Amino acid sequence: MKVFTTVKEIRKHYKNCVLRSPGFVPTMGALHEGHISLVEAAVGSCRMVAVSIFVNPTQFNDPEDLKKYPRTIEADLDMLSLVLRENDFVFTPSVEEVYPEPDTRVFDFGQLDKVMEGVHRPGHFNGVAQVVSRLFDIIRPSAAFFGQKDFQQLTIIREMARLSYPKIEIISCPIVREKDGLAMSSRNRLLLPEHRERAGEIFKTLLAAAAMVFDTEPDDIREFVADRINMSPGFNLEYFEIVEDITLTPAKSRSEMSSDKTYYGCIALFAGEVRLIDNTDIRLR
Ligand code: AMP
């Protein structure tokens, strides 16, 4: 595997290769098995793979969150070296390399960023779109791999690719979980032990909520989720929402929900100071 920090090095690498359009896995580092599952999917289906490690400042609406974000570059490279092949590469650019000029682009995602993360983290998805489009322009991939863990992000990137990068195939990969059900996340390492111990409750609550759609109104399910999460000392629900796949339209009542559609139950909460998100699919059949 190669490690590049500049666009110039990538261009030079492409000149030496027959293949110049890799499968691409963008990450912010502090890698875990969830990230590695994306890299393995890319290696399994693409003859060249590029992985980026870049903590993108423009997607952090909270400067403290950016400062606290874990950075473990040496361990990340060790993990990647076990999976990547000779001509695959890791791109670890500086902020100036990704943004030679400040990125002032404003993206319009219609209703897609008017719910959930879009409401609670203003500007977050604009920053995500900025960095993903910059990285797409630099890497020029044929396919890009994203985790279902960031369900709203995946939906928004699909829309961005449909509009601006129709040749890049967007591939979604399932959520990798710890034994107790907690979705793997770089932020999990910031959890206090007493919060980590109880964090399996998040996915259990999501599954219980998903099972309630057959006979319970969305508002009542939301109340159930809030009660169950907030009951746990130090846990604080930010939102729970049931939304339609693709459009992200929130389900308002059971009578409007259709067994032909797929829904997602999406949760965001604070465990102490650490903000966690998770989701599960919900079907009425
Ligand atoms: P991040 O480094 O958090 O920006 O994540 C990089 C990519 O890894 C995103 O596409 C995430 O959705 C994906 N990812 C993060 N955690 C998981 C997980 N537990 N399972 C599957 N994919 C994940």
Image: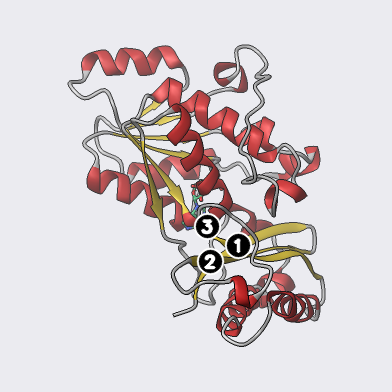
Relative to 75, residue 160 above or below: above
Q: Residues within 10 Å of mark 1 (few under 14, many from 20)?
A: many
Between disc 1 and disc 3, the foreground one is 1
Q: Residue at point 79% right, 41% down?
A: 62
Indicate yes or no: mark 2 CB to ligand 1 under 8 Å.
no
The residue to which callout 2 is attached is: 263
Between disc 3 and disc 2, the foreground one is 2
Q: Residue at point 72% right, 39% down?
A: 66
Indicate yes or no: mark 3 CB to ligand 1 under 8 Å.
yes
Query: What kind of residue is marked 2?
Result: Tyr
Q: Is residue 246 left or right of 89 when viewed as pictured?
A: right
Residue most toward the front? 255
Residue 201 numbered tag = none
**Element carrying mark 2:** strand
Residue 204 percent location from the top left of the image: 59, 80
Mark 1 vs mark 2, CA separation in Å? 5 Å
The answer, for residue 42, to whether it is visible in the render is: yes
Residue 155 percent location from the top left of the image: 52, 48
Pointer 1 and pointer 2: residues touching (CB < 8 Å)? yes
Relative to 11, residue 70 above or below: below
Pointer 3 or 2: first along the chain: 3
In front: 116, or 58? 116
The residue to which callout 3 is attached is: 149
Residue 241 percent location from the top left of the image: 67, 65
The residue to which callout 1 is attached is: 243
Mark 1 vs mark 3, CA separation in Å? 15 Å
